[in-house]
Amino acid sequence: MRCVFCRIAAREVPAEVVYEDDRVIAFLDINPLNPGHTLVVPKVHVERLSDLPAELCGPLLGAASRLARAAREALGAAGVNLVVNDGRAAGQAVPHLHLHLVPRFPGDGGRSLHSLLPVRHGLDLPEIARKLRDGISPR
Ligand code: 5GP
Ligand code: ZN
């Protein structure tokens, strides 16, 4: 059976859809962290960001950008967090790539990305950068 986000994209499972085009669908998270917490989802089933065809990265981020503006202008959000839990180790529960858009409001009690983990002092940044430069795949 197809995954729940594929089924939402196929309109087999109900959701509060806020945006749709031929490649992307966005709908409210069923367990919202704040009003307007939205999942921006490619219609194609891919699990990881690195599985997403390059030509779909722009449409996905473009939809997120427009929805971020709508969160500010239509919901009065003061800011927005855009988060991908990419992989189970990062907290991904639904194995279909999705970008969380969480509108932020003054006094909502939330913090930033930097509340996820403590700062790691003493890492060998040049060595880590070298590995990443060597490891990044060509376009
Ligand atoms: P993850 O941890 O995979 O990044 O987050 C998955 C998100 O999907 C969760 O925030 C969860 O509330 C949301 N979610 C899971 N199942 C459904 C569903 O059937 N409908 C909607 N609208 N959201 C869902
Ligand atoms: Zn899927």
Image (cartoon, rainbow, N blue to C red):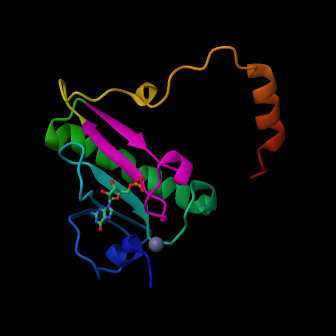
Residue situated in front as seen by the camera: 29 or 71: 29
In this orientation, which residue lies closer to the viewer: 5 or 78?
A: 5
Residue lying furthest top: 122
Q: Quadrant of the N terminus?
A: bottom left
* Residue 61 in the figure: left or right of residue 47: left
Of 10 and 109, the residue lying toward us:
109
Q: Is residue 137 magenta?
A: no
Residue at 43% x, 75% y is: 3
Residue placed at 54% from the left, 55% from the top?
Answer: 57
Q: Position of residue 11 (x, y in %)?
A: 29, 79
**Res 136 → quadrant:** top right
Count of number-bearing discs: 0
In the rendered image, the vertical position of residue 133 relative to residue 111, given as above or below? below
Q: Is the residue 110 above or below the residue 52 in the image?
A: above
Whole-percent x and y of residue 21?
36, 68
Vertical order, 132 against 101 (above or below): above
Q: Where residue 54 sits in the image (x, y, percent)?
A: 62, 58
Q: Is residue 79 left or right of 127 when viewed as pictured?
A: left
Whether residue 80 appears in magenta in the rendering, the answer is yes
User: What segment carries the magenta color?
Assistant: 79-103
Q: Residue at x 46, y 50 (%)?
A: 61
Q: State which quadrant residue 134 falls in.
A: top right
Q: Position of residue 116 (x, y in %)?
A: 44, 31
Q: Nearer the viewer, residue 35 or 109?
A: 109
